[in-house]
Image: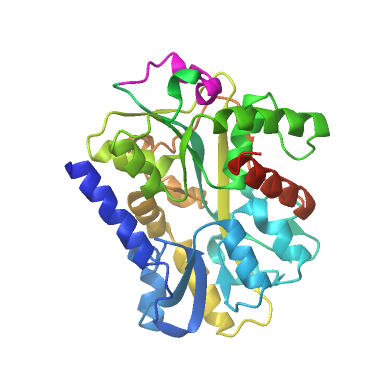
Amino acid sequence: MSKTTAYIVGAVSALAIASAAQAADPDLLVFDWAGWEIDGVLTDYVAKNGEHPTYSFFGDDDEAFQKVSSGFKADVAHPCVASLPRYREAGLIEPWDTSKIPEFANIAPHLLDSAMIKDDQGVWFIPTDYAYTATAYNKDQVPEADVATLNVFTNPAYEGRISLPDSSDDIWSLAFLATGTTNWSNVTDEQFDAAAAWLREAHKNVRAYWSDPAEMSQLMATGEVLVAWSWNDGVALLQAEGFPIGFQRSPAEGAATWFCGFVNFKDAPGSEDKAYDFMNSLLAHGSAKALLDELGYAHSNNAAMAEITEDELKAAFVDPVSTTLLAQTPVSAEFREKMINEFELIKSGF
């Protein structure tokens, strides 16, 4: 087993262990992505409250929403913004009081530019992190010309050597871009059908659908997979371990960008004051570097990001991209359900 493989297998095991709830401060339960219990973003919270919040983890947005809509109680949760409409439509959340969040004024304005996020009732979602989804590839075995187009995923030369994310948001961002749709807010039936047909072709080449960046990285490190539609963090992990990884963020058709943040549950079981302590700790300037170093994501706080060097941003692949970008913005619950159901059919071979 190579050093890279051993490192990544260990990371996968750690993520699996982290999937269970971790007990700490009983007055705040954070429902979050596995791996997000980062000391560096909790510095201010621990300094004030003496211990970490209690965490419970999920693997993807669909799992998270299913759990809370079935009665699971938490104080705050960390969905990506495309999933936000479901929380609002289900009546699960309430607006944040931004007067209690001083760094809210420094959040990148484009991350708040949606009536689903901010309306006359208040701010329903506090953006915290963002990054890109693009084409990861083995530079030793995949020519740059092949990844200059997203059709590398349907190229018969890579049959059985492709990995795609087991995530409806990420999978449809790829399919829409590949078929010429760069905005998914008003997708026609024809555009959806074209994207679905393209995904069925790509499915023929898929070795595995990855569920987290460590799994994707392991597939590439072992040589099973040569090309993957990937978040930037898995690529940065492989690069740090000396693997010959490339990350094509400017193919002919474009790449995807996403952002995630926190919602505030109604009738939460814990302390509302500690929920705001948590948000203020996460948005603190020092949290931006910790987030970049630990997970490879950019921080929503523009003032904090200005304190990070350009070289550090490039190393994590979160420096600005000059290409067509499909933003994974909020979509209706109905359209999201349509994407989920069609994806499940495609994965099943239908």
Magenta span has 149? Answer: yes
Left or right: 273, with 125 as reference point: left
**Hey, which quadrant is residue 124 in on the image?**
bottom right
**Quarter of the picture holding the C terminus:** top right
Q: Position of residue 246 (x, y in %)?
A: 36, 27
Residue 200 in picture, x, y percent from top left = 62, 32
Q: Is residue 19 above or below residue 168?
A: below
Residue at the outermost top position: 145
Q: Residue 218 versus residue 177: which sits nearer the camera?
A: 218
Residue 231 placement (x, y as % from top left): 46, 41
* Image side of residue 335 versus residue 32, left or right: right
> Magenta span has 83?
no
Quadrant (top left, top right, bottom left, bottom right) of the N terminus: top left
Q: How many circles with numbers are drawn on the protein?
A: 0
Residue at image point 50% right, 65% down: 32
Residue 162, placed above or below residue 215 = above
> What are the residue bounds of the magenta stretch?
141-155
Q: Residue at x 70, y 64 (%)?
A: 87
Camera-side residue: 73 or 291? 73
Q: Which of the pair 85/229 is nearer the observer?
A: 229
Give the vertical position of 24 relative to 302 (above or below). Answer: below
The image quadrant of residue 78 is bottom right
Q: Position of residue 113 (x, y in %)?
A: 70, 47
Inspect this view and state whether residue 182 appears.
no
Residue farthest to the front, as pictured: 349
